[in-house]
Image (spheres, helix red, strand yellow):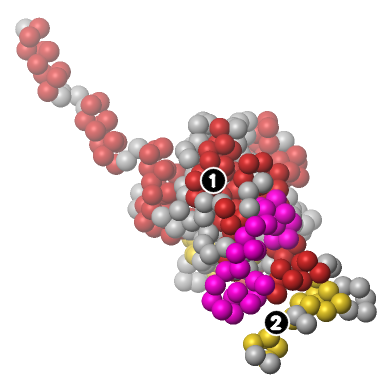
């Protein structure tokens, strides 16, 4: 038999190639065991079991999430679990083998029209693609229908960056320092290094290198609520420390071991955004801004002081120069500044013509 009932009441599926057993798995029901055996046999034959594709998306999602829970980070799993809630009923009711790129596109459009942010729709598409990728690996379907789809452009207003000008940054630093000097120091370091908040929380004393030049080695991130992991880009980078904040970084590392967190509260505790904001009264010292605007501030400071965009891209860890160019759009390019200087120059052609006509 390919399915046997164990003494404990569960069902064990067994797959053989000839007389050789190649796989086995235990299930709560006989139906699940038989379905698994059919899929595995199809996989051995290099095909897909057509009966497996008759199960609906709604039925299969919990099965996928059960396997997913211990295979990805907690943050990713929480985002994936939202599929159960966000998947439109029409798509959830379809047999998985009947889902095509057309049905997926309709689902994406429906979510976009519902007012969901474009970034959230992208996250939904990524989770949905992971689900159908699992279905392909399980030999439920032959191909992933999400692969050929695109997320429709969002209709909402995009969040604008609001970096501090250098004088505004100093005023912000003074106001925050009046409430908690150590946290003000940390926030100023963030504004001059461009580290993401998750990266700032995870940087260690050993990551502060003084020779041949003071830099921070950024290789890990610790988003709040999940375990530490690699940076968003998956790559390490070096970020130089400007003289303005070098003494602050040195002070943060005093009395700590190499593996200790570098940037912490004055009591040595891990940084938490909500607690930091509460301590410095963020709504009063930085009204209308987000902590992430400190990263935007660093990019704009660097560019305004003449650092070339490619270098800024490397310091920020951007995968594409197009992302870095957003800051040039915000600041204006050197050509824009040169053009404005020409417009404002005395004795220009326009002024000369006006003077002659007046004479």
Which stretch is magenta? 38-64
| Residue pointed to by mark 1 | 103
- Does residue 208 show up? no
Label 2 residue SS: strand
Please report the residue visible at 57 percent of the width from the left and 42 percent of the height from the top. 107
Image spot of residue 338 (x, y percent): 25, 36
Left-right relation of 233 to 332: right
Image spot of residue 88 (x, y percent): 64, 41
Image spot of residue 304 (x, y percent): 39, 44
Please report the residue visible at 63 percent of the width from the left and 48 percent of the height from the top. 94
Q: Are marks 2 and 1 in contact (CB under 8 Å)?
A: no
Query: Which residue is at the far front?
Result: 1
Q: Is residue 61 magenta?
A: yes
Image spot of residue 43 (x, y percent): 59, 75
Q: Is residue 351 above or below residue 157?
A: above
Please report the residue visible at 76 percent of the width from the left and 59 percent of the height from the top. 268
Please report the residue visible at 93 percent of the width from the left and 79 percent of the height from the top. 7
Q: Is residue 234 above or below residue 167?
A: below
Judge the density around disc 1: few (<14), some (14-19), many (≥20) Cα neighbours within 10 Å: some
């Amino acid at each position: 038999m390919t399915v046997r009932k164990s003494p404990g009441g569960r069902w064990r599926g067994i797959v053989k190639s000839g007389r050789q057993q190649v796989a086995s798995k235990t299930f709560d029901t006989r139906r699940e065991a038989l379905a698994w055996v059919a899929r595995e046999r199809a996989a051995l034959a290099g095909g897909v079991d057509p009966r497996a594709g008759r199960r609906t998306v709604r039925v299969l999602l919990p099965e996928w999430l059960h396997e997913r829970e211990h295979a990805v980070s907690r943050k990713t799993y929480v985002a994936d679990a939202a599929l159960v809630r966000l998947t439109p009923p029409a798509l959830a009711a379809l047999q998985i083998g009947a889902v095509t790129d057309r049905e997926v596109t309709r689902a994406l459009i429906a979510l976009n029209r519902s007012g969901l942010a474009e970034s959230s729709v992208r996250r939904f598409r990524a989770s949905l693609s992971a689900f159908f990728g699992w279905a392909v690996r399980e030999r439920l379907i032959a191909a992933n229908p999400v692969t050929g789809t695109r997320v429709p452009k969002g209709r909402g207003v995009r969040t604008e960056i609001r970096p501090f000008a250098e004088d505004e940054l100093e005023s912000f630093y003074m106001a925050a320092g009046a409430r908690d000097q150590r946290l003000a120091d940390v926030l100023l370091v963030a504004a001059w290094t461009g580290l993401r908040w998750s990266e700032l929380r995870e940087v260690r004393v050993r990551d502060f290198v003084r020779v041949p030049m003071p830099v921070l080695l950024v290789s890990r991130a610790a988003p709040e609520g999940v375990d530490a992991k690699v940076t968003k880009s998956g790559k390490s980078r070096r970020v130089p420390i400007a003289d303005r904040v070098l003494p602050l970084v040195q002070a943060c590392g005093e009395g700590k071991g190499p593996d200790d967190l570098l940037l912490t509260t004055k009591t040595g505790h891990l940084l938490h955004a909500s607690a930091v904001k509460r301590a410095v009264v963020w709504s009063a010292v930085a009204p209308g801004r987000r902590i992430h605007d400190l990263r935007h501030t660093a990019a704009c400071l660097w560019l305004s002081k003449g650092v070339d965009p490619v270098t800024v891209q490397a310091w920020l860890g951007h995968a594409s120069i197009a992302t870095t160019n957003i800051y040039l759009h915000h600041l204006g390019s050197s050509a824009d500044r040169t053009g404005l200087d020409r417009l404002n120059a005395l004795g220009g052609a326009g002024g000369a013509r006006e003077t002659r006509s007046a004479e």
